[in-house]
Image (cartoon, helix red, strand yellow):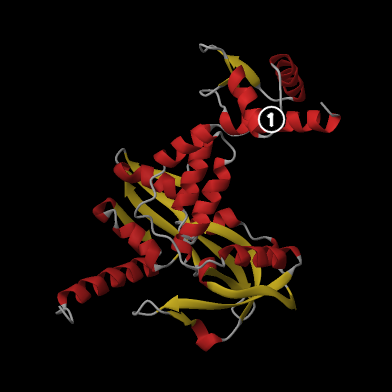
Amino acid sequence: MPASSKKAKLLYLSKIFHELTDDEHGLTMPQIIEELASYGIGAERKSVYSDIAALQEFGLAIEKLSTSPVSYALVNRPFTKEQILLLADAVQSSRFLTERKSNALVGALETLTSKPQATNLRKLLHVEGRIKMSNESVFYTLDAIQRAIAERRKVRFQYFQYDTDKRQVLQREGQWYEETPVHMTYSDGCYYLVAYNDRHEGFTNYRIDRMTRVRPSDERATRNAQTVEFDVRKYELRAFGMYTGTAQSVTLQVKRSIMGAVIDRFGEDVLTTEVTPDQANIHVTVMESPVFFGWVAQFGDRIRILKPASLVEAYSEYLQRIIDLHAQPAEGA
């Protein structure tokens, strides 16, 4: 066999083990020889044994399985099947990805395991009914933002929302936004861009899937104490639903039954003061927003805003507006 064919034989043998075997599925020696033949590579048992030894020496975890007849398999990979399942499920759950993009990414993940396990992976994934976005340009948007950040330039884009007929409507009558990209963050199934706005001297959030015609600007990014000292972890804890606003110190009185939800939202290091064995005050910094009020409201009488007084009043008004709305006769009912 020519030297080039011997090299190709090793490569095809590696390909066969990667694609067709795993710790639960092996190939017998006749099957291995048959698979090599399908690529036009002739092989004998003795040479295949030598090639397997060479691949093992190279670092491939090819082992003999205790099957009858004896089979051989690649039993160790960079990702376990459980890890790939988690990654694939995360991709399918991501609302900012379209169904087509999700399927393409899951297909790429499937190449990290064997074909038998990839088949099982598709059976385990539950994708029906998951809400997906329709904006196909999200990857190009992410790339443009990353380039702008790397080049320390502002990002230029247009931004849209939906009207009651589900049509995309450009905000600010189609005027261009030009702001300093600071960080991209993932929240509630969507990607957001945190940008610094020069006019307001503060941060604003934009849903990345609702940004369009995105490109790095010719204008240099703003660099100041706020952008340099930006802490994305603190920002995410304060910005409920990625709504921006003025950060303020808040004291909440909560019952023990919802401490798990409090820790899920603010982390285990949240500052607490025990009031009674069944009640505690928690001290956090948040931004006032309808999403924060909605988070508080879901716990009913198990949580209470104690201070500041201005936030107590704003929350009361928020609840009263809801009560007043539902007391009115519904239009079109």
Q: Secondary structure at mark 1?
A: helix
| Residue 32 falls in image quadrant | top right
Question: At 84% across and 29% down in the image, what residue appears?
Answer: 2
Horizontal and vertical percent for residue 255? Answer: 30, 46
Does 1 sit left or right of 250 as displayed? right
Amino acid, disc 1: Ser
| Residue 18 falls in image quadrant | top right
Question: At 41% across and 79% down in the image, what residue appears?
Answer: 167
Horizontal and vertical percent for residue 8? Answer: 76, 33
Location of mark 1 (residue): 14
The front one of 7 and 56 is: 7
From this viewpoint, which residue is outermost toward the bottom? 173
Does 316 sit left or right of 132 as displayed? left
Q: Is residue 76 visible?
A: no
Horizontal and vertical percent for residue 165? Answer: 34, 80
| In the rendered image, the vertical position of residue 123 relative to residue 1, given as above or below | below
Looking at the rendering, in which quadrant would you find the C terminus?
Answer: bottom left
Horizontal and vertical percent for residue 270? Answer: 47, 46
Question: At 50% across and 32% down in the image, what residue appears?
Answer: 116
From this viewpoint, which residue is outermost toward the right? 3
Looking at the rendering, in which quadrant would you find the N terminus?
Answer: top right
Q: Is residue 247 visible?
A: yes
The front one of 81 and 143 is: 81
